[in-house]
Image (cartoon, helix red, strand yellow):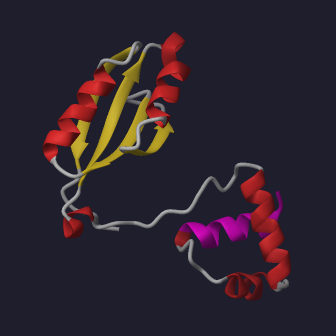
Amino acid sequence: MDEKDLKIIEILISNARTPKTHIAKALNVTETAVRKRIQKLENLGVIMGYRAVINYKAVNLVCSLTGVDVEPEKLWMVVKALKEMDEVKSMWLTTGDHTLMLEIVVKNVEELSKIHERIEKLEGVKRVCPSIVLDVLK
C-alpha cells in the first residue's frame, strides 16, 4: 500500500460516493488506475464495504452502540454468531471497557431488548452494555 492508496482511503472515508473521476484528479492518475486500486483494496479486505450514514430518528429506527464483554477463549465463537445477526450492522474488536462494540439497528425498543437478550445468551458473553443513540450528529 502506498501514498496513493492511503489518499483513496482518506477520500472514501470522507465520502464513499466520491466519483472516481474526482479521486483520479486529486491523485493525478487515470480513472482506470483508481478503479484498479480500489478493486485491489477491496480484494485485500482493506475496504470491507460501503455504507450510508443514516439519521435513525428521521426514519423511526432505533440504533444502539452496544458493548459486549466476552470470555477470551470464546471470542471468535461469539464474533461468528454476531456476524450472523442481521440486526448487527457493524462490529469492532476494541480495547478499553468492552471486548466488542456493536452497532445494532432495529425498528423499536422491544426488538432491541430481544436482540440484547439473544446476545446475552451466547456462550462466552459475560456482559452486554447498550447505549441507545438519541441523535446522529456527524
Q: Is residue 104 left or right of residue 124?
A: left
The x, y position of residue 104, in whole percent, is 33, 45
Whether residue 112 is in magenta: the answer is: no
The quarter of the picture where the C terminus appears is bottom left
Extreme left residue here? 110
Count of marks overlaid on the render? 0
From the top left corner, tell me how far across and down residue 82 is, in percent.
Answer: 44, 32
Tell me which corner region of the image, top left, top right, bottom left or bottom right, holds residue 47. bottom right
Q: Is residue 132 left or right of residue 34?
A: left
Residue at 75%, 66% in the rendered image = 38
**Picture coordinates of residue 39, whole percent (x, y):** 77, 63
- Up-down: is 53 above or below 32? above
Residues 94 and 109: in front is 109
User: Residue sitting at 26 percent across and 62 percent down?
Assistant: 56
Query: Which residue is pictured at 40% across the width and 13% down the height?
Result: 123
Magenta segment range? 1-13
Residue at 22% x, 40% y is 112
Q: Estimate the x, y position of residue 19 in percent, counting from the top left.
A: 64, 83
